[in-house]
Image (spheres, helix red, strand yellow):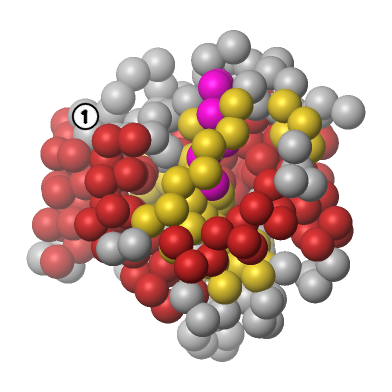
């Protein structure tokens, strides 16, 4: 593995797998070319081992490769699902990768897409290296507001949202920044209406801001409109709980894309990285 650091706060690439699948992990990491200083292999045996690793061992300055095979996929994905809130709140970069089996499709709402092997280990290592390096070069903190807005629009287009309209002008406040449509994977014939609020943030968002967003006037929009807030910031545990309560009470369908999710969406699309965060 070739290590060369160009981001001083990032120190480790942590490769995590089941004890019995370490050979798969070693065969991959030996061929990676990634921009980090050190690499660590950590084998886990139980669900609690993974939970402890996400909660204690890793940090926002690490990138975690979660290695699985077709046989362990169900167990590993269940582990990811049960730890997803911790991963997102701690802003951990987790890349699930799978040896063997079919390639799996993913969409805008997939929490953590699984990168599947092509069968050629060198090609697979190149694919994984590219994804790791994409993450390392994405920085949402210093963007100009209009650039951030363009990124959001291009992300939506990339992940199959359409009829994207900027919902403001110099004379009228429409309450939201964008309107668009989306056809869900479960029912391609059903057109979803989305209202998008874009928020550049220098600090964690508050429940007050989310509450204000939910209470905005939507009388001029389709009654079934869903609300999405896109921000480069991070979310508190209180916001997670508040949004969960809102959804359970069916007050409104709201989806929040924070900085963690944005980096995930951008890193998996090389064209977006090349346009906004070029490094080659």
SS at mark 1? loop
| Quadrant the C terminus occupies | top right
Vertically, is 158 above or below 36?
A: below
Percent of width and height locating residue 140: 56, 25
Q: In this view, does 184 lie to the left or right of 60?
A: right
Q: How crowded is mark 1: few (under 14 residues within 10 Å), some or many (20 or more)?
A: few
**Residue highlighted by disc 1:** 206
Quadrant that contains the N terminus: top right
Residue 258 in the image, given as x and y percentages of width and height: 42, 39
Q: Residue at x 34, y 35 (%)?
A: 57
The boundaries of the magenta stretch are 10-15
Magenta region includes residue 14: yes
Residue in the picture at 81% in, 28% down = 278
Residue lying at 42% horizontally and 69% vertically, measured from the top left: 77
In this view, the residue in front, 30 or 78, is 30
Whether residue 272 is visible here, answered yes or no, is no
Magenta stretch contains residue 142: no
Say how many tags the image has: 1
């Amino acid at each position: 593995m070739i290590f060369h650091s160009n981001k001083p706060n990032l120190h480790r690439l942590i490769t995590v797998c089941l004890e019995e699948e370490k050979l798969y992990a070693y065969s991959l990491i030996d061929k990676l070319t990634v921009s980090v200083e050190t690499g660590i292999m950590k084998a886990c045996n139980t669900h609690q081992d993974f939970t402890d690793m996400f909660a204690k061992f890793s940090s926002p300055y690490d990138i975690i490769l979660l290695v699985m095979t077709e046989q362990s996929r169900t167990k590993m994905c269940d582990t990811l699902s049960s730890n997803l809130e911790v991963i997102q709140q701690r802003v951990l970069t987790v890349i699930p990768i799978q040896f063997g089996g079919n390639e799996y499709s993913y969409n805008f709402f997939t929490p953590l897409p699984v990168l599947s092997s092509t069968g050629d280990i060198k090609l697979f290592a190149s694919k994984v290296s590219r994804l790791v390096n994409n993450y390392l070069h994405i920085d949402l903190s210093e963007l100009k507001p209009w650039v951030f807005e363009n990124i959001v629009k291009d992300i939506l287009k990339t992940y199959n949202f359409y009829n994207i309209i900027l919902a403001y002008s110099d004379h009228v406040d429409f309450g939201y920044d964008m309107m668009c449509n989306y056809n869900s994977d479960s029912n391609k014939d059903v057109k979803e209406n989305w209202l998008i609020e874009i928020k550049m943030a220098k600090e964690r968002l508050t429940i007050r801001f989310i509450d204000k967003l939910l209470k905005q006037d939507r009388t001029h929009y389709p009654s079934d409109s869903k609300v999405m807030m896109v921000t480069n910031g991070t979310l508190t545990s209180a916001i997670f709980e508040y949004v969960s309560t809102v959804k359970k009470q069916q007050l409104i369908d709201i989806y929040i894309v924070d900085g963690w999710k944005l980096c995930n969406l951008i890193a998996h699309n090389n064209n977006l990285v090349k346009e906004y965060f070029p490094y080659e």
